[in-house]
Amino acid sequence: MICQPKMNDYKKITRDPSYSKLRTIDTFKIHQLSKVWLQASLEVSKGLKNIVVTHHAPSIQSVPEHYKEDPLTSAYASNLEDMITEHQPLYWIHGHIHSPSRYKIGKTEIICNPHGYIDEKYNGYEKELIIEI
């Protein structure tokens, strides 16, 4: 509930068909449904080279240290480390966080390589980042 009054997503995004404002309960429900879909997708593709691409980070490890205690952090990163450990996709690529990060959970490489807002100072973005599949 702390996110709703503070984040632009909840001030500017509307829901269909009512066009009422997006609420935290809406994003929670979407997250739960998305987890079920992703879990099932990873189950049926075992043995293949899986790459997961999400908007939000799958782990708090992607969050810069100075934001880890911020109550809004839960709106930027979920704890999907158990899913990563269970299925070990090759890569998990995500956005939403404005600081680049690259680390491993088990055999999975987690990559966030955001450019950031145009008026932000250089954040370490790798313009020519290439991953090998």
Image (cartoon, rainbow, N blue to C red):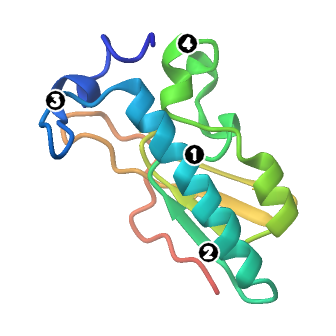
Whether residues under marks 3 and 1 lie with C-beta atoms below 8 angstroms apart, the answer is no
Q: Identify residue for label 1.
A: 32
Q: CA distance from mark 3 to mark 1?
A: 21 Å
The amino acid beneath tag 4 is: Asp
Q: Residue at x 35, y 17 (%)?
A: 4
Q: Identify residue for label 4.
A: 70
Q: Identify residue for label 3.
A: 20
Asked if residue 31 lies left or right of residue 3, the reply is right
Q: Residue at x 48, y 29 (%)?
A: 75
Whether residues under marks 2 and 1 lie with C-beta atoms below 8 angstroms apart, the answer is no
Q: Residue at x 52, y 77 (%)?
A: 130
Between 3 and 113, which is closer to the camera in this rendering? Answer: 3
The amino acid beneath tag 3 is: Ser
Image coordinates for residue 101, horizontal then vertical, percent? 59, 47
Between 45 and 92, which is closer to the camera in this rendering? Answer: 45
Q: Single out the mark in the foreground, 2 or 3.
A: 3
